[in-house]
Amino acid sequence: MLFPTIEFAVFFAVVFPITWLLNAHYTWKKVFLVAASYYFYAAWRPEFTLLLLVSSVFNYGAALLIDRFKGRARLAVLWAAVAANLGLLGYFKYYNFFAASLMNAFAAFGVKVGIGFIEVALPIAISFLTFHALSYIIDVYRRVLAPTRSLLDIMFYIGFFPHLIAGPIVRANKFLVQTVGPRDPANIRLGQSVFLILGGLFKKVVIANYLSTGFVDGVFRDPAANSSLDLIFGMYAYALQIYCDFSAYTDIAIGIANLLGYEFPQNFNYPYRAVSVQDFWRRWHMSLSSWLRDYLYMPLGGSKFGTLATCRNIMITMALGGLWHGASWAFLIWGSLHGLALVIERLLGVTGEHGAKKRGTFATVLGWLVTTQFVCLAWVFFRAPSTDAWLGYFATMFSGRSWSTSMTPFVAAICVLGALSHILPPRWFVTLEKRYDEASLPVKVLVPFVVIYLISVAAPAGIAPFIYFQF
Amino acid sequence: MVFRSGSGSGIGMGDRPRRALGAASALGAACLVLSLLAPLAVTPCRAAAAAVAEASSTIKIAFAGDSIVDNYWSGIGRIVDANPCLKNTVALGRFAKNGTGLTRGDRVYWPREIRRIDDVFKPTLSVVSIGLNDRQFIVDGNGARTAWGAPDWTDKYRHELDEFLKAAIATKAVVLMVGMPAMREEIDNADIAGKNAMFAAAVAALADPNLHYVEPWRLHAAGSEAFASYGPDKSGRLVQIRTPDGQHFTAAGEDMAADYLFPKIVQALNAAGKNLDQCLTKQSKDER
């Protein structure tokens, strides 16, 4: 069940009023929301709701055990629970990739090794689900959070449908406190939620979909067959597409959660305004980058043990962060490139709060320019379907072979619309939300209907899944 | 339910709601402009097709159907791009509509859509793959619903298929109806086997010289076909050929499927008097 579909609209039209009718009976409300979330997940594959259930029960029990033990036993239980969670992820998502890589490596030396492949469906959103579960048990281990005695709360935290499929990654300590009592309707930021949802629909259904089908897919299909100019445009168009696609999903998720009375963390903050790669990761998929910082980079030692160890920790974190996106060398390269850029920035001392304050206008503009070009170039690895494709992409783009373009004025207009999402001042959106909050009820009801109708008219036919669904 | 904001109530629209509506309509206005521009939207391949279409000798191939046909469009596209002669002779049109099929006429009614494709693109040949999303209730072109699993579901589906194929034939283009390849899930495969048999029977029953059923691509030429997400490429390296959803092709898989499908396209074009021999090497002709 995708967000921009009639099916989801009907689903939410049922869930929304019932959730608030049950607000005073919050245990029943949670039971209802868990049931609704499992129904939402079952829309793809009913049998994988069992995985959701097993993950919830297992991590619920693991957290209670961690809390019961002290010292080494406590650490041992944590490691066992982390290994079980990552083992499940590895089995479903990475086994075939590593098996094929191993067989190819042996074959390169003339040794034939037969490792069988496994043909099981990849449970949708297993990466997000695993990171939610790990957040809970690690926070319990660190005593940031007391383990909940309520299995229902854990089922709710791991399975809550707005974040279930593609995030944002909500921390257990931030979410579980919201499950202890009725939610206050006065805390709903209606204008913000409605515009997050409507803006998200517009970004995904109109901008991302048209960019994808109208230009980007054609350019990336066979990069070597395109002109240099088309490849340059294609690179920037994809940067806009992936932003409009992914930020749309999390915007809608945050808006929906807020309409149901729950707070999710911000996930994007004008990422293409970043003036350094470190700044980019503070603005792009913020819930993932902070997760990687807190649960991978810091346990590795962070920046506590000297420059060399810090660089190593950055590289490990970013390479694994890249691999988290998918079982392919391209994602590993993409993550490693970002790691390398972060290391270079650190060695040059161009990052950090101190550096940002000292930076003048010229350095800021230069930082933005270099960062944007780097991020967009790195996206080619993320999008190119094969090694040959990204090799061909860069070889052709830098060859200056031809400067003609097949980009139509329509696609160019869509690119401008996508870019506007970064150019328009944030205060405009705040004003828009405020005006909506102040409007009468009929206007409040009318605006979403009219905008959704116009989006549906403007959208290309068919349903394109969100890019981050595969992760 | 009480929301935080409470002002602006009343039947008449005061300044605030008027401003709110005006401001909120900014997004709507953008949609409206886009909706007006949408018919002008052309994909690069269609733009390229339009440019190449100036020459009367251009062979135009439309790819129509669900998301699987996008995989064929990509794979065939790379074959065409790699051959300068084919690139100057063949124009590809991408008309896949993700998530659609023959069951949901309320979303995209394919008999109408195939006529629209003919109007805008005038294909010489259409590669069609459809049915991936059709394990569900049917809404026909008039909006009548038939529940999934109802006793008359298969008859209704066959009727929708006939309507579609007749509309496709009426375009005068050569039509290749490609069967669906093996999928990971048994439930999908059982469904696909039934649908592929239905497609083959419907094509045979219509007995139109321009309409052909093409058996789906198989990883192994002989023996029973089983789904495999990894397989050897031309150099023997193991590569991922199917996407994690267990249905679609990766780029490597697209190339494999295209290598299988392209000779069928050439053959069907030859039979229709459109020869691509001048662009094909001796080896590719032998393979055909």
Image (cartoon, rainbow, N blue to C red):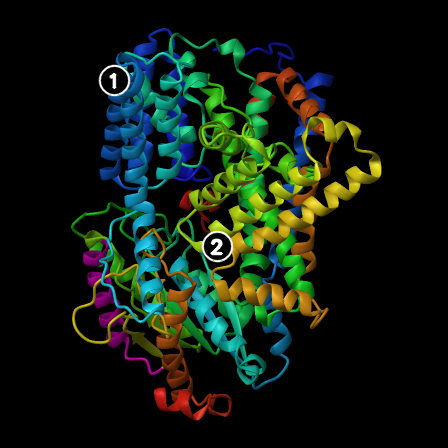
**Which chain does the residue under circle 1 lie in?**
A
Can you say which quadrant of the picture contains the N terminus of chain A?
top left
Residue A208 rendering spot, x and y as whole percentages:
56, 47
- N-terminal of the two: label 1 or label 2? 1
To which quarter of the image does residue A455 belong?
top right
Characterize the magenta stretch by its predominant secondary structure. helix
User: Which residue is pictured at 68% across the width and 39% down the height?
Assistant: A276
User: Which residue is pictured at 56% across the width and 43% down the height?
Assistant: A339
Check the image and report above or below for A19 versus B202: above
**Magenta segment includes B282:** no
**Which chain does the residue under circle 2 lie in?**
A
Callout 1 amino acid: Leu
- Secondary structure of the residue carrying numbered label 1: helix
Question: Which stretch appears magenta?
Answer: B188-209
Please tell me how crowded label 2 is: few (under 14), some (14-19), or many (20+) other residues with Cα within 10 Å.
many
- Foreground: A463 or B14? A463
User: Which residue is pictured at 19% across the width and 54% down the height?
Assistant: B186
Residue A290 rendering spot, x and y as whole percentages:
52, 29
Callout 2 amino acid: Ala
Residue carrying label 1? A65
Q: Is residue A191 left or right of residue B280?
A: right
Residue carrying label 2? A330
- Secondary structure of the residue carrying numbered label 2: helix
Q: Is residue A246 left or right of residue A153?
A: right
Can you say which quadrant of the picture contains the C terminus of chain A?
top left
- Foreground: B113 or A365? A365
Q: Is residue B69 visible?
A: yes
Residue B89 rendering spot, x and y as whole percentages:
55, 83
Residue B280 rendering spot, x and y as whole percentages:
47, 88
Please tell me how crowded label 1 is: few (under 14), some (14-19), or many (20+) other residues with Cα within 10 Å.
some
To which quarter of the image does residue A191 belong?
top right
